[in-house]
Amino acid sequence: MIATTTASDLVEALRWIVRAGRAVHSADDDLHNAPAALLGLLAREGEQRMGRLAGALDVDPSVVSRQVAMLCAAGLVSRRPDPQDGRASLLGLTDSGRACLDQHRAQWAGRLTTALAHWDDDDAARLLALLRRLSADVRGHLVQEKSSPAPGHGVHPELQSG
């Protein structure tokens, strides 16, 4: 088990990486990370209903609805009636959406390649493996935590029985 101080240091390092990524976001990159995640999911999984997208991205459906409206207006996402349920829509990636996503990924890969120019591939591969492990473990824990919250979770300690 890792020490609490190590966990705190990891949280701070991850926050710093996120802040640095936001700071580097440039005007030539039309696609912010949230819409990029949505486009990436559509690229990977194919057409999806809005509710499925919200669940997969772990965000409120209203957030996805706003993003989808923006992406549809920009011609990056298409919407068509779901043949199995005419009340629902299927959302898919357009050719323009694929090109935009590819450009976004290439820009970020270029930035990372430049920033890590002094790294060798073995170090990068080890980091990638650890990040994938971290992501899977954190996601697994969060899913488990959502499905079975700890006793008193979210309740002020003075209000807990016992």
Image (cartoon, rainbow, N blue to C red):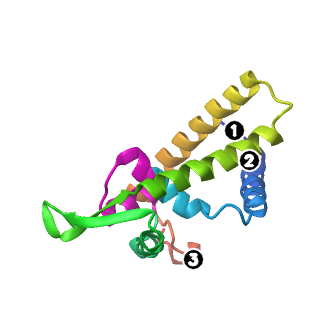
Q: In the image, what residue type sits under mark 1?
A: Ile
- Disc 3 target residue: 158
Quadrant, the N terminus: top right
* Magenta segment boundaries in residue numbering: 41-58
Who's the residue at 67% across and 61% down the image? 29
Of the pair 90 and 161, the residue shown nearer to us = 90
Is the residue 81 above or below the residue 10 in the image?
below
Please report whichever mark, 3 or 1, sits nearer to the chain's N-terminal start: 1
- How many residues crowd around disc 1 within 10 Å: few (fewer than 14), some, or many (20 or more)? few
Residue sitting at x 61%, y 53%: 104
- Between circles 1 and 2, the one closer to the viewer is 2
- Of residues 162 and 9, the one drawn nearer to the viewer in this rendering: 9
Asked if residue 122 lies in the magenta stretch, the reply is no
The kind of residue on which mark 2 rests is Leu
Q: Disc 2, disc 3: CB below 8 Å?
A: no
Q: Is residue 50 magenta?
A: yes
> Is there any visible trace of residue 45 in the rendered image?
yes
Among the 4 quarters of the image, the one containing residue 69: bottom left
Which residue appears farthest toward the right when viewing the image?
A: 118
Disc sitting over residue 122 in the figure: none
Q: Position of residue 152 (x, y in %)?
A: 48, 66
How far across and down, in percent of the image, does residue 13 sit?
77, 50
Q: Is residue 80 left or right of residue 68?
A: left
Disc 1 to disc 2: CB gap under 8 Å = yes
Q: Which mark is residue 2?
A: 1
Location of residue 44 in the rendering, given as x and y in whole percent from the top left corner: 41, 45
Look at label 3 and name its amino acid: Glu
Which residue is pictured at 25% across the width and 65% down the height?
80
Q: CA distance from mark 2 to mark 3?
A: 31 Å
| Residue 78 percent across, percent down from the top left | 35, 64
Vertical comparison of 24 with 69: above or below:
above
Closest to the camera, between mark 3 and mark 1, is 1
